[in-house]
Image (tube, grey):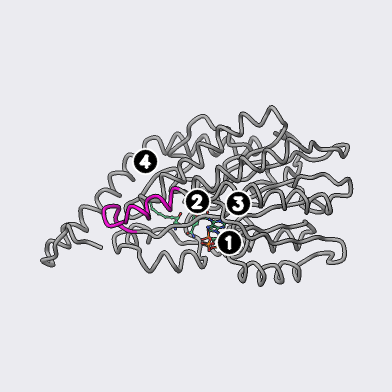
Amino acid sequence: MSIFTRRNHFPISHRTFVITGGSQGTGLSLALLLSSRGGNVCIIARTQSKLNSALEEIKAAAKDPAAQKFRAISCDLTDPTAVERGFEEVREWCKGVNEEGQGAPDVVWQCAGGTKPGYFKNQSGERVVQEAMGNYVSTALTANAALKLMTSAPPTRPNQPQRHIIFTSSILGFHPLPGYNTYSPSKAAIRSLADGLRSECLLYNISVSCCFPATIYSPGFEEEQKTKPELTKIIEGSDEGQTCEEVAGRCVEGLERGEVSVVTGWMGRVFRGAVWGGTPKGGNWGTMVVEMVVASVMGVVWRLIAWWLDGDVLRYRKKLVKEGKNVMDAK
Ligand SMILES: NC(=O)C1=CN([C@@H]2O[C@H](COP(=O)(O)OP(=O)(O)OC[C@H]3O[C@@H](n4cnc5c(N)ncnc54)[C@H](OP(=O)(O)O)[C@@H]3O)[C@@H](O)[C@H]2O)C=CC1
Ligand SMILES: CCCCCCCCCCCCCCCC(=O)[C@@H](N)CO
């Protein structure tokens, strides 16, 4: 951590990035940002057609199109065999990108994930499994494959910046909300994995960070709105939301400052402060002091927020009863 200097902890130019979920939404915005700053970018997602059009956009955004390299890999990250195969492709691609033929990327940034919100009892058993797979299991498999690659091809350049694995959780990974109960536990599990790996990866000199965005107006969010219960929309109403570009930019800024738990706005700060825990937050001394103040205030204030959030649920129940609706059938 820098005390007096402002070292950039997240150099981009000439480095090699793998972005899961890079075919749309936040992952695509990140890929575009990294490309425009001179990074080599490989995106991973399932749907080939979306990968193709995203790759064209990413190439068009390049800072130095003649020198930068790009790749799209179709892979279902919930399937261990597919992940192994996908990362073999990453290894081969990296060998061609790095001057020294290093068969590993500098950064693996995980953005794949999503949810179909709904009351938990209304979700199918398959949905419960799918969300655990699509959010937590896919992330764990990707981190596993990324670490295998990074440790089998150690850095060879003098003063090569630390390799880096970046996770994407959500503020719901700090504290869950009604309507998101197939999703929030997976995002909390991602937070736990990031915490555990951050410590374990000190062994290999590999950095691990985790980003915690709030509402992002992405294609995934548009889909969410179709099944989201009215109650969830009411509770979420106090969050302004951000565009994909804004979230991508804020995450990169946080990483440049050396933050380990990266939030993208004040809502994120509040949630992170409520779940202070033992995770180092990173960043400089100034931000650390601010975080400590937020955390100590939140220790008290979160009691009130939790009470207010439960109040939203109870008020909504009252409203349904008053309208003569069956609460058990709420959707
Ligand atoms: N939108 C929001 O409000 C918030 C989102 N987040 C998190 O941020 C991340 C990005 O979200 P958002 O921008 O909404 O993303 P989108 O839902 O718009 O896009 C998701 C991306 O992930 C890919 N993907 C999904 N499942 C898999 C899979 N099994 N294997 C490979 N790729 C997969 C999709 O491509 P394809 O379907 O072709 O595979 C797509 O590229 C997610 O992890 C999300 O949970 C966090 C906070 C808020
Ligand atoms: C003074 C402070 C008051 C705090 C009150 C709490 C308000 C709750 C805002 C919830 C926002 C939900 C973001 C969900 C993001 C997400 O991950 C999903 N969209 C899935 O993609």
User: Callout 1: helix, strand or loop?
Assistant: loop
| Res 76 quadrant in image | bottom right
> In 3D space, how far apart are the residues under numbered discs 3 and 4 (Cα atoms)?
42 Å
Where 75 sits versus 176, above or below? below
Q: What residue is shown with label 3?
A: 82
Circle 4 Cα neighbour tier, 10 Å, few/some/many (<14 / 14–19 / ≥20): some
Residue 314 pos. (x, y %): 20, 52
User: In front here: 105 or 49?
Assistant: 49
Q: Amino acid at mark 4?
A: Trp
- The label nearer to you, 1 versus 2, is 1
Q: Which mark is residue 132?
A: none
Badge 2, how many Cα within 10 Å: few under 14, some, many 20+? few
CB at disc 1 and ligand 1 closer than 8 Å: yes
- What is the distance, in whole Å, between disc 2 and disc 3 at their CAs? 38 Å
At label 1, counting other C-alpha atoms closer than 10 Å, the crowd grade (few under 14, some 14-19, many 20 or more) is some
Cα–Cα span, label 1 and label 2: 33 Å
Front of the two marks 2 and 3: 3
Task: Answer left or right for 319 relative to 7.
Answer: left
- Dot 3 or dot 4: first in sequence order is 3
The numbered mark at residue 302 is 4
Q: Which residue is mark 1?
A: 46
Dot 2 or dot 3: first in sequence order is: 3
Q: Is mark 4 within 8 Å of ligand 2?
A: no
Residue assigned mark 2: 266
Inter-mark Cα distance, 4 to 2: 14 Å
> Which residues fall within the magenta stretch?
118-132
| Residue in the image at 78% along x and 66% along y | 62
Rounded to the nearest whole Å, what is the CA distance between mark 1 and mark 3? 11 Å
Mark positioned earlier in the residue sequence (1 or 4): 1
